[in-house]
Image (cartoon, grey):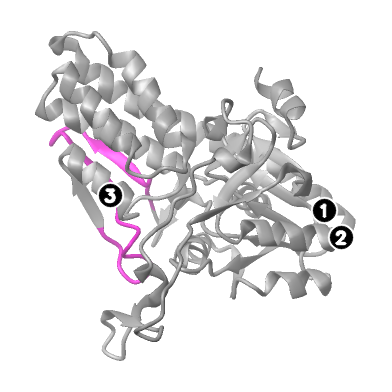
Amino acid sequence: MKIEGKEYRTIWFDDKNKIVKIIDQTKLPHQFIIKDLKTVKDAINAIKTMEVRGAPLIGATAAYGLVLAILKNNDQSFLKKSSEDLINSRPTAINLKWAIDRMMKKLSGINSNEILNLAINEAKEICEEDVKFCENIGLNGLNIIEEIYNKKKDTVNILTHCNAGWLATINWGTATSPIYHAHKKGIKVHVWVDETRPRNQGANLTSYEFNEEGVLNTIIADNTGGILMQRGEVDMCIVGTDRTLSTGDVANKIGTYLKALAANDNNVPFYVALPSSTIDWNIKDFKDIPIEERNSEELSHVEGLDENNKVKKVLIYPKKSKALNLAFDITPAKYITGLITEKGVCEASEQGLKKLFR
C-alpha cells in the first residue's frame, strides 16, 4: 500500500546488505522512519516494543529474525535458542509460533552451506503468502460490503477496532482488506475508527493508512461505538484477531469483546478477518489463551506533538495511581457473525472452520 504516494511493505529483506528493514510503527503518524534490523536481538526488540505489531507481521518478523540469527551463527543449537527467544517475545499472537515452527521444520538438520539461503527464501515465502492471503480475505469480504451497499444504496458505515490494516500485515491488511477492495471498486465506504487505547493504534495507524489511501474515516473514542450502533450509524463491524481457536472464539485487542456485545445487542453484523496462520487448532478453551499484560506506562502516559512540533510523552494519571494494562480480550464465537478468511467466509465454529481448512 502507499505512503505519500509510494508503495511500501511493512518488512523486507535487503539482499545486498543482508539486513531486514521495517517501518518503525512506534513513530507513526508523526514520523515515517525505516529502521534496520541487523541481529536476532534487534528483531526480538522490534516485536517487544511494537516497532512491528499485528499477528501476521510479528510472524514475518520472527521468520526474518531466524535469518539474522543464522547470519551471526548457523549452529543448530544457537538457532534453537534464538527460536525460543523469539517465541517468548510476545505470548498472545499465534502467528509468531506458527512462523517459527515452520522455519525450524525447514531448517532443522540442514548443513551450514545451504541453511542461509533456505532461511531467506522461506521467510520471503511467508511474506508472499501473507500478501496473497490478505488479498483473498479482501475479495471474500468485499462481497459482504457490496451486498450491504446494494441494499442500502448509500455509504456503508463500517466500525473497526485497533489496527488490522496493512501495517499489521505485509500488505492489504486483514480487517481493512475488504474495505480497500470496496473503495477501489468505487463502493462508498466510511470507517468509524476506534482510537484503541492505550497505544492508540486505531488513531495512529488505521486512520493514518486510510488517509494515505483516500478512504473516508472518522476517529472515535473507544466507547462511542455503542451509541453509533443505537443510532443506526454502523452497518457492520470488521476486526482482526491475534489468535482464533478452532471453536471460533477469538483473541484480539482489548475492547473487541465490548464492541461485539454492542453489535449483538443492536443487530449489527460483527465479522472477524483472519488468515489461516492465525488459527490455533490445539487450544479448545479460550481461558487457556495467554493474555499479554504490558507495562502500565502505556496507560499512564501519552505521546503527541507539542506546540513546537516535537514528539513529547506526558503523564496523564495521578502519580500515585496504579494501572492494569491487559493487551487482549476474548470474543466468544456466539457473538461473531462470520469469519472472513483467505478461503472464504464461514461461521465462527469448529464445523465452519473445518469446512474450509480440514
Residues 84 and 142: in front is 84
**Above or below, comparing residue 173 to residue 324 in the picture:** above
Q: In the rendered view, does 244 fall on the left or right side of 5? A: right
SS type, badge 1 = helix
Q: In the rendered view, does 19 fall on the left or right side of 237? A: left
**Above or below, comparing residue 322 to residue 205 in the picture:** below
Q: Amino acid at mark 1?
A: Ile
Foreground tag (2 vs 3): 3
Residue 15 sits in which quadrant? top left
Give the distance between the C-alpha atoms of the residues marked 1 and 2, in whole angstroms. Answer: 6 Å
Q: Residue furthest left?
A: 72
- The residue tagged 1 is 148
Magenta residue check for 162: no
SS type, badge 3 = helix
Q: Position of residue 40 (x, y in %)?
A: 20, 37
Residue 187: in sight, yes or no?
Answer: no
Neighbor class of circle 3 (other Cα within 10 Å; few <14, some 14-19, many 20+) is: many
